[in-house]
Image (spheres, rainbow, N blue to C red):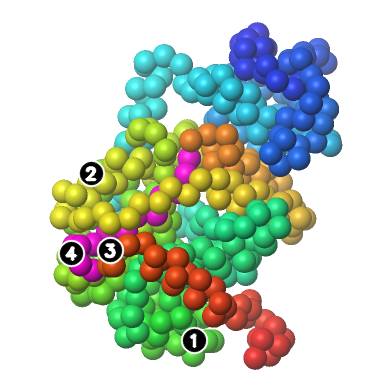
């Protein structure tokens, strides 16, 4: 316990945490008083943690991000009511933020070097490993994602144009699609490639709003099956087509390309290949829009817990990496937007919906999977709330004349799309479909 005691003694300078070790000995950290999450109305009072296994403290202390996540998954770490694991993570990272975040980073040049090397090796996404990694994350039962996402199953950041506390996830996701579509500068009849199409919501949205033909590609079989079901039931399967394939195998020529939540899975070593291939696929006067998680600072590496359990092969890029590699392939960056804090509110809502469906999720999987998913969502939220993660939206062109000179067109078109409304959303329940019609 001495190593964890040393870590927490240094890290906790605001609020209070009380840890009871497996032998019943109690340790108190922080001065107490006040609320630890004033920005979201945090619950007052000390956070009480109970360690149930003799190895829990040393496992957490060796590497806080991996060890804490595994200890919580295995039931070695229990957060006592009225608080939960989200409270604990936000509390610790809020304190670390005030210390300059140094207390959560791996110590020593050897450990840092090892982490960077592992992250780079894990980012080698050949065709076989890319499909395996995609299936690991996205081929979980569709019923799981139905429990915590919005009805359109947007598994990326929602866009909170108004007060996040008063905006539904469904509206924020609809506003995200309008914001992205506006940046694509679309016209009816165009051919669009949607790389990493997810559950098809954005592709269907673009066809609905513009009458464009869309080809969506992804590597998770259940996602593509679901996309095809949606297109068939909406009667647009001839205009919006989905394929289980690697983007590197796509051929043809497109007026527009979108990639939403894709670049995090490409791997830095494959950025040249991504930008070169998409450049070949896009017409000379075309536009490509990319939306991805990003680092507000310099390049880094994926933490060990996320790399092991959630996104194998994943990496969140710095803006410098995206711009540098795209320039080498002949792209010109026309617009960059850093979306701050939007994902933290999105993840908070996903977390709350997951908790709401605890019984159903544990029945689908088990209690350990449920705890793993909670830790993932809460850990991701803290990265966007207390850390330095943002979302990047970049607009790429091959010819600077492809888009208007000023950004007014983005705001005007986004407003027009929001006024038009959304594609009717129903989960393939005949009763809901009939009601929608």
Query: In the figure, residue 38 lies in which quadrant?
Result: top right
**Disc 4 vs disc 2: which is toward the camera?**
4
Give the vertical position of 200 relative to 169 (above or below).
below
Residue identified by numbered label 4:
399
Left or right, residue 176 beside residue 404: right
Relative image position of residue 230 (x, y in whole percent) = 52, 80
**Res. 324 mark:** 2
Residue identified by numbered label 3:
405
Residue identified by numbered label 1:
232
Mark 2 or 1, nearer chain start: 1
Residues marked 4 and 3 touching at CB (< 8 Å): no
Few, some or many C-alpha atoms within 10 Å of disc 3 (few <14, some 14-19, many ≥20)? few
**Disc 4 vs disc 3: which is toward the camera?**
3
Which residue is rendered at x = 65% and y = 34% of the image? 90
Query: In the figure, residue 53 lies in which quadrant?
Result: top right
The number of numbered badges drawn on the structure is: 4
How far is mark 4 from mark 2, CA to CA? Answer: 18 Å
How far is mark 2 from mark 1, CA to CA? Answer: 41 Å
How far is mark 2 from mark 3, CA to CA? Answer: 23 Å
Q: Chief secondary structure of the magenta span?
A: strand
How far is mark 1 from mark 4, CA to CA? Answer: 36 Å
Mark 1 or 3, nearer chain start: 1
Instruction: Give the secondary structure at mark 2.
Output: helix
Q: Which span is picked out in magenta?
A: 389-402
């Amino acid at each position: 316990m001495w190593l964890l005691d040393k870590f927490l003694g240094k890290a906790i300078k605001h609020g209070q945490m009380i840890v009871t070790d497996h032998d019943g000995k109690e340790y108190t950290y922080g001065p107490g008083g006040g609320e630890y999450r004033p920005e979201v109305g945090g619950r007052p009072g000390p956070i009480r943690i109970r360690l149930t296994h003799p190895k829990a403290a040393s496992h957490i202390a060796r590497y806080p991000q991996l060890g804490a996540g595994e200890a919580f998954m295995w039931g070695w770490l229990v957060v006592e009511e009225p608080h939960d694991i989200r409270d604990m993570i936000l509390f610790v990272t809020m304190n670390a933020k005030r210390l300059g975040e140094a207390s959560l980073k791996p110590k020593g040049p050897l450990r840092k070097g090892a982490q960077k090397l592992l992250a780079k090796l894990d980012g080698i996404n050949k065709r076989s490993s890319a499909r395996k990694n995609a299936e690991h994350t996205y081929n979980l039962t569709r019923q799981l994602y139905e429990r915590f996402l919005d009805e359109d199953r947007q598994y990326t950041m929602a866009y909170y144009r108004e007060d996040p506390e008063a905006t539904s996830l469904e509206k924020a996701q609809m506003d995200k699609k309008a914001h992205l579509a506006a940046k694509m500068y679309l016209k009816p009849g165009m051919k669009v490639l949607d790389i990493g199409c997810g559950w098809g919501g954005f592709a269907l949205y673009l066809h609905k709003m513009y009458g464009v033909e869309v080809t969506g590609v992804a590597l998770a079989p259940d996602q593509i099956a679901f996309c095809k079901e949606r297109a068939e039931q909406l009667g647009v399967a001839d205009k919006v087509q989905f394929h289980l394939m690697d983007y590197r195998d796509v051929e043809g020529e497109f007026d527009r390309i979108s990639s939403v939540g894709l670049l995090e899975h490409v791997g830095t070593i494959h950025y040249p290949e991504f930008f070169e291939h998409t450049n070949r696929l896009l017409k000379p006067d075309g536009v490509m829009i990319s939306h991805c998680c990003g680092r507000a600072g310099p390049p880094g590496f994926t933490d060990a817990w996320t790399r092991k359990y959630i996104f194998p092969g994943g990496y969140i890029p710095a803006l410098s990496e995206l711009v540098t590699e795209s320039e080498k392939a002949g792209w010109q960056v026309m617009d960059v937007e850093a979306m701050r804090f939007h994902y933290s509110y999105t993840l908070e809502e996903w977390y709350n919906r997951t908790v709401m469906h605890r019984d159903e999720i544990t029945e689908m999987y088990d209690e350990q999977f449920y705890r793993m998913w909670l830790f993932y969502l809460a850990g991701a939220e803290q990265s966007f709330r207390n850390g330095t993660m943002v979302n990047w939206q970049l607009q790429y062109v091959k010819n600077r004349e492809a888009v208007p000179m000023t950004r007014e067109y983005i705001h005007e078109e986004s407003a027009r799309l929001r006024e038009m409304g959304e594609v009717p959303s129903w989960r393939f329940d005949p009763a809901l479909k009939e009601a929608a019609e």
